[in-house]
Image (spheres, rainbow, N blue to C red):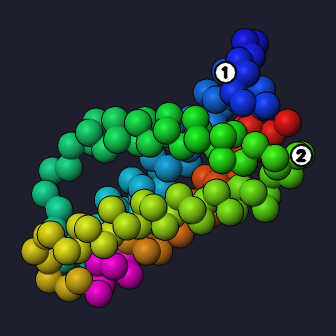
Amino acid sequence: MAITETGREAFSRSSFWLGVAAYLLPTFPIAYVWHLVLFAPTYDALGIYRPDPIIPFGFASMVIQGIIFSWAYPRLFAKRGGAIFRPGLAYGLALAVLSWSFTTLAVAAKNIMASVPLYVELETGFTLLQFAIVGPLIALAHRN
């Protein structure tokens, strides 16, 4: 296991890749089931998404996000000690707000859809669920 110094804290490459996995492993199935199974008829009625989503593009987007979010965690929560749950939820909340700003608000502002309030409600629910799970898992991956 290689360790590199980042400021005063040690950064473990294995923790980094575990953090990426902590993002990808729950996010992909949650997103797939939420958007393409559970609420697929509602999203279809909104008329916002293409009928044949390009799954590899969505997954590639998640890989990029996972890399950035895992890289950022130990830098933003350098003085977390052994704590996992509280900093994980705080990180999840921060990521949720950031994500919500460009996956919900910006999309609602730019795209034609049958109901902006319904879209915002659906995506807010998805974002909160996703990051309530992912934040603590990334914290767990980067535990001291």
Residue sitting at the far left: 112
The answer to whether residue 41 of the structure is visible from this angle is: no
The front one of 17 and 97 is: 97
What residue sits right under mark 2 in the picture?
82
* Mark 2–mark 1 distance (CA, rounded to whole Å): 18 Å
Q: Residue at x 23, y 83 (%)?
A: 116
Quadrant of the rendered image containing residue 39 = bottom left
Element at label 1: helix
In the rendered image, residue 114, in percent from the top left (x then y), is placed at: 14, 83
Q: Which residue is drawn at 45% across and 61% down?
A: 98
The front one of 91 and 135 is: 91
Report if the CB atoms under discs 2 and 1 are less than 8 Å apart: no
Image side of residue 30 versus residue 2, left or right? left
Q: On residue 13, which mark appears?
A: 1
Q: In the image, which residues are magenta?
A: 117-122
In the rendered image, residue 12, in percent from the top left (x then y), is placed at: 72, 23
Magenta portion: prevailing SS class: helix
Q: On residue 130, which mark appears?
A: none
Q: Does the magenta stretch include residue 121?
A: yes
Q: In this view, does 128 lie above or below 115?
A: above
